[in-house]
């Protein structure tokens, strides 16, 4: 039954294939990255992953993406810097900032001011993730 629902979602429910949105998921937390990739791919999205801001930006040199999910706190380049660069160089790309810091609201609010379209506070449910992604890709 779930497979049928996912197939209908991918086909727009009318038998006509819809273009598959491409999502870039940037987070240094390996288990979270893999879990979210599996959930998003199960919902019919094409998912690229990166464990750091620089790796994510390198992927963008060769790939077009519709949406980027970006963790705020990562080594080597924080998510706020990635969001600024994405907003400037890929204005059509939707951005969702993620954070689990105890000060997350300050950082998530800053992320919105820097160009993020939405935010997710960690820990979040897979349903919250899918809802946020779906909302941005409408």
Image (cartoon, grey):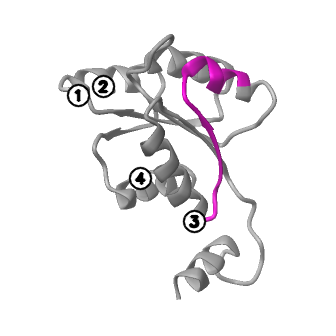
| Outermost residue toward the top in this view | 76
The circle on residue 42 is 3
24 or 94, which is in the foreground? 24
Q: Which contiguous range is marked in magenta?
A: 43-58
The reply to whether dot 1 and dot 2 touch (C-beta < 8 Å) is: yes
Residue 73, image x and y in percent?
Answer: 38, 21
Ranked by sequence position, the earlier of labels 2 and 4 is 2
Report the residue marked by disc 1: 105
Residue 80, image x and y in percent?
Answer: 44, 17
Q: Is residue 53 magenta?
A: yes
**Residue at 72% over, 28% down:** 60
Residue 47, image x and y in percent?
Answer: 64, 48
Q: Is mark 3 on a helix, strand or loop?
A: helix
Report the residue marked by disc 2: 109
The circle on residue 40 is none
**Residue at 58% over, 23% down:** 87
Q: Is mark 2 on a helix, strand or loop?
A: helix
Q: Is mark 4 on a helix, strand or loop?
A: helix
Q: Which of marks 4 and 3 is in front?
A: 3
How far separated are the C-alphas under marks 4 and 1? 17 Å
Ranked by sequence position, the earlier of labels 4 and 1 is 1
How far separated are the C-alphas under marks 1 and 2? 6 Å
Q: Nearer the viewer, mark 2 or mark 3?
A: 3
The circle on residue 129 is 4
| Location of residue 122 with respect to 36 vertically, above or below | above
């Amino acid at each position: 039954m779930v497979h049928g629902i996912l197939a209908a979602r991918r086909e727009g429910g009318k038998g006509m294939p819809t273009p598959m949105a491409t999502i870039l998921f940037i987070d240094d937390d390996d288990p979270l990255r893999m879990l979210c990739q599996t959930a998003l791919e199960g919902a019919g999205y094409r998912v690229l992953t990166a464990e750091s801001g620089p790796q994510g930006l390198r992927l963008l040199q060769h790939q077009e993406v519709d949406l980027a999910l970006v963790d705020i706190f990562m080594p080597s380049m924080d998510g706020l810097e990635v969001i600024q660069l994405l907003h400037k160089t890929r204005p059509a790309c939707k951005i969702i900032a993620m954070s689990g810091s105890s000060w997350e609201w300050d950082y998530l609010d800053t992320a919105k001011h820097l160009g993020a379209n939405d935010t997710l506070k960690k820990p979040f449910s897979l349903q919250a993730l899918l809802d946020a992604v779906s909302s941005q890709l409408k």
